[in-house]
């Protein structure tokens, strides 16, 4: 077997590490665009703390607090204009995966011209981005540890990743203490997203020994600790484990990519702006039922880590796990209707061809349409 693993990201992991952001930022620039959302970092006090640390280090900053779940191409281009006009030479992301993805795309478009959709669909390449410091506040996407930024085009509904090494964060500060302000429902959703990253990376045609090792460690940690954290446990070691599992999953998919669950979820949330983790929860067990015999040994490993026994009961093991974190759902409960299935099926092949190719079961339009129907 031959393989290559390359991921040039600097990770600073540990409780209280966010206090070092001023010193760290001074290595990369003198004026930062702080990208965040409207609510959580303000309510938790994190934004105020980071601003204090930056001021203490003599770093000027401008706040861009427009990031939203399922960030759009419009936000990326708008934020880049703000950063360029203000003369920012550094971007700092404070928030969950959507915030980090928004910040990555802003850092990229500040250094490139035209429509970001041209870069997402590889009609143009681009070569540079502003340095980015990522401070995740949710243990879900792992965006702090890879070169992906998922964006939705509001005009077309296309939800697809900008993928470039230049948007890998220059440094990510991963502070498990910042995760403990999440409401249980948010924790369940982002935690299941993190689990899916490692399950799909383990099943991917691009999996290799390094990604396998990270994926299995992450699956084991989430299976062992996420349900207790959802129930209110304050166990510091458990928070550390799940936080690291999220970052590890981000590293996994940078190399191995995602598979059919993410590939099929993106059209659903691109169309109806549903919560990503809930879309995955509706689709993943059904996809597993249909796919498990295409990679029985790997599905059996996942099943056993989640409390099952064999490949054939992996879907049920995933459902049992979802029930522990209050996330059992269907696509219809997320607002998807039977009339949406033809569009989502076609869009899946437009935006998720790599994910379809990665999956153990080679799915055609009939299979994908059937899965959407079963997941309603």
Image: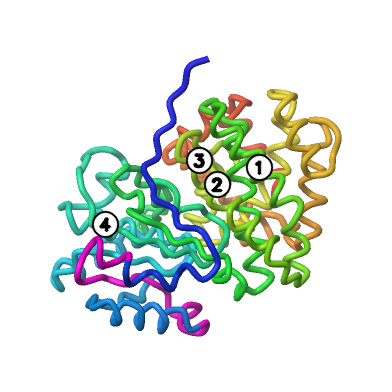
Tell me which numbered mark, 3 or 4, is placed earlier along the sequence. Answer: 4
At label 3, counting other C-alpha atoms closer than 10 Å, the crowd grade (few under 14, some 14-19, many 20 or more) is: many
Disc 1 designates what residue? Answer: 217
Which residue is more in the foreground, 72 or 225? 225
Disc 2 designates what residue? Answer: 248
Residue 315 quadrant: top right
Tell me which numbered mark, 1 or 3, is placed earlier along the sequence. Answer: 1
Give how far across and how far down residue 147 sits, in percent. 38, 46
Q: Is residue 192 magenta?
A: no
Tell me which numbered mark, 4 or 2, is placed earlier along the sequence. Answer: 4
Disc 3 designates what residue? Answer: 253
Does 83 sit above or below residue 265?
A: below
Q: Label 3 near label 1: C-beta < 8 Å?
A: no
Q: Nearer the viewer, mark 2 or mark 3?
A: 2
Farthest residue toward the right? 309
Which residue is more in the foreground, 95 or 264? 95
Q: Which residues are magenta?
A: 24-44
Q: CA distance from mark 4 to mark 2?
A: 21 Å
Disc 4 designates what residue? Answer: 131
Q: Is residue 270 left or right of residue 184?
A: left
């Amino acid at each position: 077997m031959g393989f290559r693993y390359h991921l040039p990201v600097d990770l600073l992991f540990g409780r209280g590490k966010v206090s070092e952001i001023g010193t760290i930022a001074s290595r990369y620039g003198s004026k930062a665009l702080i990208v965040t959302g409207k609510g959580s970092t303000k309510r938790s006090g994190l934004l105020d703390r980071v601003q204090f640390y930056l001021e203490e280090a003599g770093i000027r900053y401008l706040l861009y607090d427009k990031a939203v779940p399922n960030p759009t191409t419009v936000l990326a281009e708008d934020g880049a204009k703000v950063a360029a006009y203000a003369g920012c030479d550094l971007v700092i992301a404070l928030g969950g995966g959507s915030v980090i993805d928004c910040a990555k795309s802003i850092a990229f478009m500040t250094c490139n011209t035209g429509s970001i959709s041209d870069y997402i669909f590889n009609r143009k390449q681009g070569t540079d981005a502003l340095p980015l410091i990522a401070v995740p506040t949710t243990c879900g996407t792992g965006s702090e540890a890879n070169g992906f930024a998922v964006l939705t085009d509001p005009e077309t509904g296309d939800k697809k990743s900008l993928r470039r090494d230049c948007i890998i964060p220059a440094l990510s500060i991963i502070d498990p203490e910042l995760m403990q302000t999440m409401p249980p429902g948010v924790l369940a959703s982002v935690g299941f997203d993190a689990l899916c990253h490692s399950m799909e990376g383990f099943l991917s045609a691009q999996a290799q020994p390094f990604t396998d090792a990270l994926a299995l460690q992450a699956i084991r940690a989430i299976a062992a600790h996420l349900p207790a954290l959802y129930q209110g446990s304050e166990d510091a070691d458990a928070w550390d484990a799940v936080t690291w599992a999220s970052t590890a999953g981000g590293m996994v998919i940078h190399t191995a990519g995602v598979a059919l669950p993410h590939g099929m979820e993106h059209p659903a949330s691109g169309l109806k702006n549903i919560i990503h983790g809930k879309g995955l929860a509706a689709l993943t067990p059904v996809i597993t039922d249909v796919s498990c015999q295409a990679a029985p040994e790997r599905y059996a490993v996942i099943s056993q880590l989640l409390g099952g026994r064999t490949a054939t009961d992996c879907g049920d093991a995933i459902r049992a796990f979802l029930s522990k974190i209050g996330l059992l759902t269907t696509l219809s409960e997320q607002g998807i209707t039977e009339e949406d299935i033809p569009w989502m099926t076609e869009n899946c092949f437009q935006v998720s061809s790599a994910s379809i190719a990665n999956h153990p079961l080679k799915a055609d339009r009939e299979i994908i349409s059937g899965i959407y129907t079963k997941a309603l």
